[in-house]
Image (tube, helix red, strand yellow):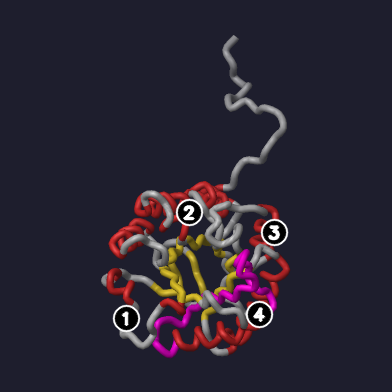
Amino acid sequence: MLKIGPYTFQSRLMLGTGKFSSTTIQSEAVKASETEILTFALRRVDLDSPEPSFLEQLKGGDFRFLPNTAGAKTAEEAVRLARLAKASKLSDMVKVEVIGNEDTLLPDPVETLKATRQLVEEGFIVLPYTSDDPVLAKRLEEAGAHAVMPGASPIGSGQGILNPLYLKILIQQTSVPVIVDAGIGSPADAAQAMELGADGILLNTAVSGAEDPVRMAQAMMLAVKAGRLGYEAGRISKKETASASSPKEGLVN
C-alpha cells in the first residue's frame, strides 16, 4: 500500500492524461492501468469550468487528481498555479514542476525547493519533480515534501534509468515515498525502478505514445506490481562463479 500524506493507495502506478490520440483511448488506458492517481498540467485546464474536459470521460472512476505546475519557470508561478487548483477544489495534492532548461526540461533545483517550502507552509500535499540528485531529494524532504519524484532520464525520452546508482542512493536515504517520474520507456524500466526500491512510478508518454496505449498501460501495471514484489522478496546476490541449483548431499552413486 502506498501512503502519501494522509492518503493511501492500492496502486503504485500513476498516470498522466496528456498526449493520447483520443479521449476514448485515454479512458481505456486509464482503466487498464488500474491507477488511482491521475496527473495533468494546470495550464491546460480551464479552472473556471465546473469540470476539466478530460474528466468528463472518466466519470465513475474513483481517482485522486494530482495537478502539476508544468510550464512554471519560477517558484512564484508554481505557487500561483497550485493556489488556483486548490481554490477550484480540484485537489490539495500538487506536483511541483519548475523547469530550469527548455531543451532538457530538467527542473530548477533552487526554485523547486523554494516552491516546495511555500506550498507545504500553505497546507498542500506536495510532490516535487526533481533530478536524481540524492542531496536535493533530502533537502526537499526536509522542506516538508510528502514524496519526491526524481526523473530516471529526461522527460518523454524513454531512455529508462540512466543512473541506477544515484537513484538507489536517493531511495535508500529518503524517508518519504520516492515516485520515479520521467524517462520510463518500457515495462522493463518500470520493473527495474521498483526493484531498486522505488515506491511508485508516474508515466505518461510511455503509455500514450505506444502503438497500443491500452495494452501498454496494462503491461506497465503488471511491471510495477512484479518489480515491487521482487524488491520485497529480496533477490539473490550476484556471483562471479556458478552455483549448482541441485543439492550435493544425498546423491545416488
Q: Identify the element where label 3 is drawn.
A: helix
Q: Identify the element where label 2 is drawn.
A: helix
Between the C-alphas of marks 4 and 1, the distance is: 30 Å
Q: Identify the element where label 1 is drawn.
A: loop
Which residue matches tag 1? 51
Q: Which mark is residue 230?
A: none
- Asked if marks 1 and 3 touch (Cβ < 8 Å), the reply is no
User: Which mark sits nearer the N-terminus, 4 or 1?
Assistant: 1
Q: Nearer the viewer, residue 10 or 245?
A: 10
Q: Amino acid at mark 1?
A: Glu
Between the C-alphas of marks 2 and 4, the distance is: 31 Å
User: Which mark sits nearer the N-terminus, 1 or 2?
Assistant: 1
Q: Amino acid at mark 4?
A: Glu
Instruction: Identify the magenta region.
Output: 86-110
User: Which mark sits nearer the N-terminus, 1 or 3?
Assistant: 1
Q: Residue at x 70, y 65 (%)?
A: 134
Q: Residue at x 42, y 76 (%)?
A: 44
Q: Which mark is residue 224?
A: 2
Which residue matches tag 3? 169
Which residue matches tag 4? 111
Instruction: State left or right for residue 233 relative to residue 39.
Output: right
Q: Residue at x 48, y 60 (%)?
A: 203
Q: Identify the element where label 4 is drawn.
A: helix
